[in-house]
Amino acid sequence: MINAYVDTNIFLNVWNEEIDPKSGKELWRGSKGFLNKIEKGEYEGITSITTLMEIVHVFKVGEKDYNEALKDLRKLGIRILVPDSWTMIKAFEYEIEHDLDPYDSIAFAVAESAGSEIFVTRDGKLRRNIRGLIRAVEPEEV
């Protein structure tokens, strides 16, 4: 089974039913389709504890209940990984060497340490910056 790292924005696309304001593309549909593939066991979905922290933060700022979101993650069977010290050192290196922000560098380091074959994200800059290190794709490309 293919191990796929799922970035924060994929979950938020679905929960917020996000639509690209420029193109009108329903981002949430592609993200939901990909998450359904994880739920069916076609992919092993992984993410990091920092992704959960970002999700909780976004829900709190929007004054929404984040508990349903956390239940959804459990139901999907997404494996939540906690970075160890070696992974955090690698994250720091990636932040510097590949112009990643702190959360993205941790996400990528976790994906790499878990042996992920693909990194699923809507973040174009992140995809460009890790190209050549891992197959970084949008959910519709999976």
Image (tube, rainbow, N blue to C red):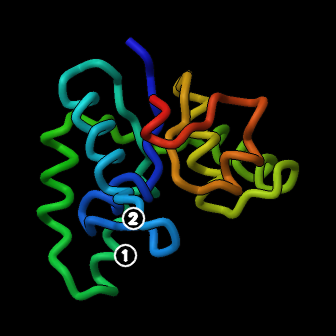
Instruction: Return the residue found at the far front.
Output: 23
- Lateral position of residue 3 relative to residue 119, left or right: left
Q: Which residue is drawn at 66% across and 62% down?
A: 102
Residue at mark 2: 53
Locate residue 27, reporting x and y percent. Answer: 38, 57
Locate residue 34, reporting x and y percent. Answer: 33, 36
Q: Residue at x 53, y 25 (%)?
A: 116
Quadrant containing the C terminus is: top left
Q: Residue at x 34, y 22 (%)?
A: 43
Q: Residue at x 35, y 41 (%)?
A: 80
Image quadrant of residue 119?
top right
> Decide: marks 2, 1 in contact (CB < 8 A)?
yes
Q: Which amino acid does label 1 sit on?
A: His
- Lateral position of residue 114 relative to residue 28, left or right: right
Residue at mark 1: 57
Judged from the image, the secondary structure of the residue bearing numbered disc 2 is helix
